[in-house]
Image (spheres, rainbow, N blue to C red):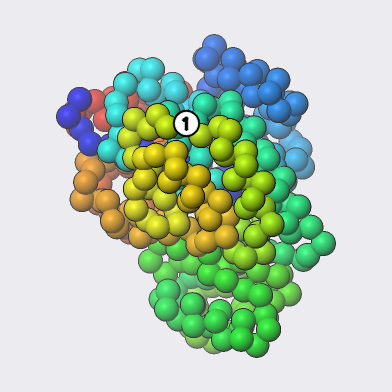
Amino acid sequence: MSVKCAFLFPGQGSQAVGMGEDFFNNSALAKQMVSDASKRTGIDFETLLFTENDDLEKTEFTQAAILLVSAIAHKLFEDELPIKPVYALGHSLGEFSALVSVGALNAIDAVALVNLRGKLMAEACAGQDVGMMVSLGLEDEVVEEICEKQRDAGLKVWPVNYNAAGQIVIAGIKPDLEVLAPVLKEAKAKRAMLLNMSVASHCPLLASATAPLAEKLQEMIKDEFIAPVVSNVTAKTYNTKAEALDLLPKQLVSPVLYKQSIANFDDDVDCYVEFGHGGVLKGLNRRATKKPHFVVSDMASLATAIEEVSKLG
């Protein structure tokens, strides 16, 4: 096919009970992947994904569940429409799903890897009252300056997710974030709201997690990229194991440059296909691009995406 697609993968925050259940009920491949992931990790993914529970909000389980559903969605799409993307891009955790999609990680290995990643992140934050906050309506530079001034005053707050124009997520110590909220509102933020997060992602508080993650990455990453992946750290592409081993540990303590990544490569693609629950990235892309964006989250949306992408080709 001549259509130029970018493959996109969501991160933490896109989870919901019931995600992936339609795939599971209608696809032998999905059932097998759920079974394989359960055996590999010791996590009962049928219970985690399809029944009400508290574990789905715990980062070690959240990350594994999101990646598994994204990998299933991508595999079902690929089996019907074998198309090589121009690039793959994931938001935070989604970068690991992106690596699966281009052949640099085995899907079940990746589920185990991000389960470990979540545990390491939780351990790094243990004993600290950490959190994350979204700021809406302010320019990047304003938020950066406010956070810098607060750090100079002794607070631990960092801009960490550059999601869309006027939308930045800030991570740090929760009481410090609560101090930050009225400062952001005084600067004319439309909203400054704490998020339901159990870790403080992409900031120096996770420094202790980088070395053990790097060690496990060395075992699992393959030098078999069929297409480049866009790094959250640099908003540039990479396509080798050596680059992945350098960038992925840094990703834990560096901001996610999502909107910059879309801006850098939007001219190179005809459409976006997002794999996984929620369509979160479609929402972020709404103001960033005019290109078609398809979400593969169940069997019906899978069929629609295959049909629409085929028309473009």
105 vs 190: above or below? above
Q: Position of residue 131 (x, y in %)?
A: 68, 64
Mark 1 lies on residue? 222
Residue at 24% across, 25% down: 310
Percent from the top left, x then y, of residue 141? Answer: 42, 78
Q: Is residue 176 left or right of residue 25?
A: right
Q: Nearer the viewer, residue 274 or 115?
A: 115
Question: Is any atom of residue 62 visible in this view?
Answer: no
Q: Nearer the viewer, residue 26 or 215?
A: 215
Relative to 233, 183 lies left or right: right
Label 1 element class = loop
Left or right of 69? Residue 52 is: right
> In the orientation shown, which residue stands out farthest toward the right?
127
Q: Is residue 144 visible?
A: yes
Which residue is found at the position 56% from the left and 79% from the top? 147
Q: Is residue 70 left or right of residue 78?
A: right
Amino acid, disc 1: Lys
Report the residue at 27% width, 38% height from top. 86
The correct choice, above or below, for 272 with respect to 164 in the image is above
